[in-house]
Amino acid sequence: MLLDHFNSFADYQPVDMLLDFSVFNCASLLETPIDTTPLRPREGGFLPSTLVETDRGFIQARDVKPGDMIYTFDGGAQEVQAVRHAVPRLTTLMHVPAGALGNDTDLLLPADQTVALELDAAERLFGLPLVTAKLIHLAGHKGIKAAAPESIGRIHITCTEEELIWAESGMLVLAGEGGPDGAFCELSLTEVRQVLASDEGRALSQTGMGAEDARYPDPFDAVFMPALAA
C-alpha cells in the first residue's frame, strides 16, 4: 500500500551504511564473562552537615568538591580526587558528645565510620601514637552511644591515598576503605576494650583510686549494638 504524502519516496541512507560491523564482533561479546558480583556497600562516609577542614576553612561535607584541598593528619593539604553521594536505605548512627573525640559540638556520625584514637595506652600496647577504630566499638566511651537509625545521605570523600581528615575542629575521620590492610592500624572490638580499659586504669592509678572505689560500670556492659545497615 502506497503512502500518499510528499516524502513517501524521499531519498534515504541505507541502514548498513550507518553501522560498521567490521569493528563490532558479537562473538567476542558472548565469550566475555559478565561479572555478576554485587557491589559491596561502602562503609563510613561523612554526613552532609559534618564540618571538614579545607583551604577555604571548615566547610560542610556537602560542599566539598573534587579539586578542593583538604587537610589531613600526616599528609598536609591533599587534593580531593572524587566525591560520591549516597543515600542508604537506613544508616545506624552514633551520638558523639562534644569533646569525646576532639569535636567541639555534639555530633551524629555513621556507626561504621572509622575515627582516630590518640591514647597513651595505644602507644604502650601497640607502639603506635595513633590507632583507628569503628565508631560503634567506642560505645560507652566518654558518653558515645547509639542513636536512632535514619535514612540519611552519606558523602564519601576520596583522595589519592587513604587519609585521616580533620573534622569538627579537632577529630580525625578516615577517608578511604580502611580495614586490617589499610594505611592506619584499625583495632578490633576486643583490642579497643583493652586499650580503653588500660587507659582508664592508668588514669585511676594516677589519682590513687582503685577500680572498686571508682565504681565505674563497664562501658561495654549491656551496650545496644545494632546491626549495621547497608
Image: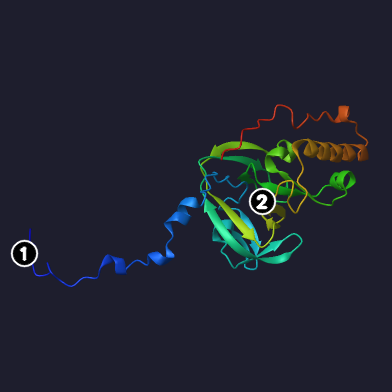
Tell me which amino acid carries mark 1.
Asp
Label 2's element?
loop
Left or right relative to 121: residue 35: left
Q: Is residue 205 left or right of residue 131?
A: right
SS under mark 1:
loop
Q: Nearer the viewer, residue 120 or 194?
A: 194
C-alpha gap between disc 2 and disc 1: 66 Å
Image point (69%, 52%), residue name: 173
The front one of 229 and 212 is 229
Residue 43 percent location from the top left of the image: 62, 46
Image position, residue 58 (x, y; %): 63, 61
Left or right of 23 in this view: 124: right
Whichever of labels 2 and 1 marks the residue nearer the N terminus, that label is 1
State the scheme by which the image is colored: rainbow
User: In the orientation shown, which residue stands out farthest toward the bottom?
Assistant: 11
Residue extending farthest left: 4
Q: Is residue 182 above or below residue 203?
A: below
> Which residue corresponds to the image point at 8% horizontal and 66% vertical from the top-left?
5
Residue that label 2 marks = 177
Q: Quadrant of residue 14?
A: bottom left
10 Å crowding of disc 1: few (<14), some (14-19), many (20+): few
Foreground residue among 14 and 216: 14
Kind of residue sitting beneath label 2: Glu
Which residue is at the front of the view, 198 or 211?
198
Q: Indicate the quadrant where residue 25 lies.
A: bottom left
Quarter holding the N terminus is bottom left
Q: Residue at x 91, y 33 (%)?
A: 209
Q: Quadrant of the C terminus?
A: top right
Residue 223 at x, y percent in the picture: 69, 30
Left or right relative to 204: residue 146: left
Question: Looking at the picture, how far across and down is residue 176, in whole percent?
Answer: 66, 54
Q: Which residue is mark 1?
A: 4
